Image (spheres, rainbow, N blue to C red):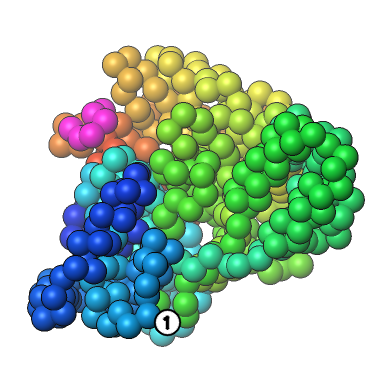
């Protein structure tokens, strides 16, 4: 089958964000501050001038960053009155570091049509690519690129900004009491103490209101500290796993990076599978499933956005929301959300739900059968609708843990039925693609159909990303042979 490589997208170690730096020992923090407070003002001004010269051109508003990081540790400074602006900024600089988000890899891409299709020529389509960017300490984040695709599927990547920015967290994001309660029950943590706390919450509540309800329950003295504190830990953990973030309008798509924020994703937000979802009222919502990793455990999460400026992050729940690699269908099927899952690490399942956050039942639809996928199979992004059926891009792991990309065709009305499959991989690591951080791997998190071709962005060996295209008619003919 004909396939052509359209573009290669490589990591750029020059792309950096700022992070707050704080030594683990309070005494170390205090010692740093005391040394800075003892400096002569002339030396302070000179060192700050050099610091700004070295770093101001690498960040849009470095002085705001430094001042914010000063305020984060200002509680350790007994006498703040009289400190010059320059000294505060220099103190902030000593508690700030750069982090190169793509220094290790830029991989596992997905692609969706851009929300806005303005300023384009006839036949052009603007798209968004998402990538898993990995830097020092193998911490993963989500980054974006935009591109314009011509009517002949030539791809023109739009300029990548030299700047990056992390989002603002929405203070007091709203929580749904019944969803929150159901998740605690699934975790086995909806105790009598939790029930007492929830008696003080409305149907919709904020983080601030959770805190107030906890204090009211604590002051009632009905529960022992041991009974109450364990419940509080789980409630706070769950609240911090469900949050909202936003990027300011005017910030380019290539400047936005979703970096780990909650404790459960402290070691990375991995493998986002974005999909353009058509709601029953015709409105579009972009969803992405991803894996939150804290260094020990993984947790399936859901991203929701309408414009790629404001994002809502929430947990996915239920026995079918386990393991890695959940992929949402781009519309409801028979009035229900539908998801491809892999709860056992080996096989593919289809799950339906009336609530996008909870997945309780499913049916196994595919097991490893081909010699190139004997170890395990998984999906490579959301199913894609065609007149002949749902195209599901898969990956198979075989001898020597070689990852290949395959395709199955699911029935349109009943996607639990496989009506076609490729006998051989659609894509496999070529000789020039097999070397990298994890060798012998090709992998994708989402594709689209455009101008009669299947466009697949895919990662090679967990290092960089390529984009390939396959004629749709040719693919469908092979699937239905």
Q: Give the residue displayed 87% in from the left and 55% down from the top.
A: 200
Secondary structure beneath label 1: loop
Q: Where does residue 259 sit, x and y in percent of width and height?
A: 41, 55
Q: Where does residue 27 sit, x and y in percent of width and height?
A: 32, 48
Question: Does residue 436 belong to the magenta stretch?
Answer: yes
442 vs 204, nearest the viewer: 204
Q: Give the residue displayed 44% in from the left and 58% down from the top.
A: 258
For residue 98, above or below residue 71: above
The residue at which mark 1 appears reads as 250
For residue 351, above or below residue 398: below
Check disc 1: other Cα within 10 Å, few if <14, some if 14-19, many if 20+: few
For residue 62, above or below residue 10: below
Q: Give the residue displayed 70% in from the left and 29% down from the top.
A: 319
- In this image, 216 relative to 449: left or right? right
Q: In which quarter of the image is residue 432?
A: top left
**Residue stretch in magenta:** 435-440
- In this image, 124 relative to 281: left or right? left
Question: Does residue 333 belong to the magenta stretch?
Answer: no
Q: Where does residue 336 sit, x and y in percent of width and height?
A: 78, 47
Magenta stretch: dominant secondary structure: loop
38 vs 188, nearest the viewer: 38
Residue 128 visible in image? no
- In this rendering, the count of numbered labels is 1
- In this image, 28 relative to 251: left or right? left
Q: Give the residue displayed 70% in from the left and 42% down from the top.
A: 232
């Amino acid at each position: 089958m004909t396939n052509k490589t359209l573009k290669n997208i490589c990591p750029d170690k020059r792309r950096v964000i700022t992070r707050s730096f704080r030594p683990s020992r309070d005494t170390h923090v205090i010692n740093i501050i005391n040394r800075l407070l003892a400096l002569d003002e002339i030396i302070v001004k000179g060192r700050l001038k050099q610091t700004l010269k070295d770093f101001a051109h690498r960040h849009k508003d470095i002085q705001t960053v430094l001042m914010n990081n000063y305020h984060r540790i200002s509680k350790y400074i007994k006498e703040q009155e009289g400190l010059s602006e320059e000294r505060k900024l220099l103190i902030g600089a000593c508690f700030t570091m750069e982090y190169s988000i793509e220094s290790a890899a830029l991989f596992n891409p997905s692609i969706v049509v851009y929300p806005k299709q303005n300023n384009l020529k006839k036949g052009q389509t603007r798209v968004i690519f998402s990538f898993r960017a990995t830097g020092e300490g193998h911490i993963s984040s989500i980054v974006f690129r935009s591109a314009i695709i011509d009517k002949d599927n030539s791809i023109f990547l739009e300029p990548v900004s030299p700047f990056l920015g992390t989002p603002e967290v929405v203070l007091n994001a709203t929580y749904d009491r019944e969803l929150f309660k159901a998740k605690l029950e699934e975790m086995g943590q909806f105790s009598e103490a939790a029930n007492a706390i929830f008696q003080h919450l409305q149907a919709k509540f904020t983080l601030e209101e959770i805190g107030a309800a906890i204090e009211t329950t604590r002051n009632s003295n009905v529960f022992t500290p041991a009974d109450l504190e364990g419940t509080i830990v789980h409630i706070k953990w769950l609240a911090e796993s469900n949050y909202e973030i936003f990027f300011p309008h005017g910030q380019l798509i290539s400047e936005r990076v979703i970096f780990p924020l909650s404790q459960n994703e402290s070691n990375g937000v991995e493998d986002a599978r974005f999909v353009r979802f058509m709601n029953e009222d015709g409105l579009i919502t972009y969803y992405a499933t991803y894996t939150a990793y804290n260094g020990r455990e993984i947790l399936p999460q859901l991203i929701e956005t309408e414009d790629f400026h404001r994002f809502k992050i929430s947990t996915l729940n239920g026995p079918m929301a386990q393991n890695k690699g959940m992929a949402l269908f781009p519309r409801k099927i028979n009035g229900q959300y539908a998801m491809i899952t892999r709860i056992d690490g080996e096989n593919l399942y289809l799950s339906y739900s009336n609530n996008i956050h909870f997945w309780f039942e499913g049916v196994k639809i595919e097991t490893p059968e081909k010699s190139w996928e004997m170890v395990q199979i998984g999906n490579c992004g959301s199913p894609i609708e065609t007149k002949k059926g749902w195209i599901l891009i898969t990956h198979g792991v075989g001898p020597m843990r070689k990852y290949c990309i395959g395709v199955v065709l699911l029935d349109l009305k009943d996607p639990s039925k496989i009506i076609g499959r490729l006998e051989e991989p659609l894509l496999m690591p070529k000789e020039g693609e097999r070397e990298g951080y994890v060798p012998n791997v090709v992998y994708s998190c989402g594709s689209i159909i455009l101008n009669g071709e299947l466009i697949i962005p895919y990662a090679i060996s967990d290092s960089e990303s390529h984009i390939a295209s396959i004629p749709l008619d040719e693919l469908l003919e092979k699937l239905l042979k």
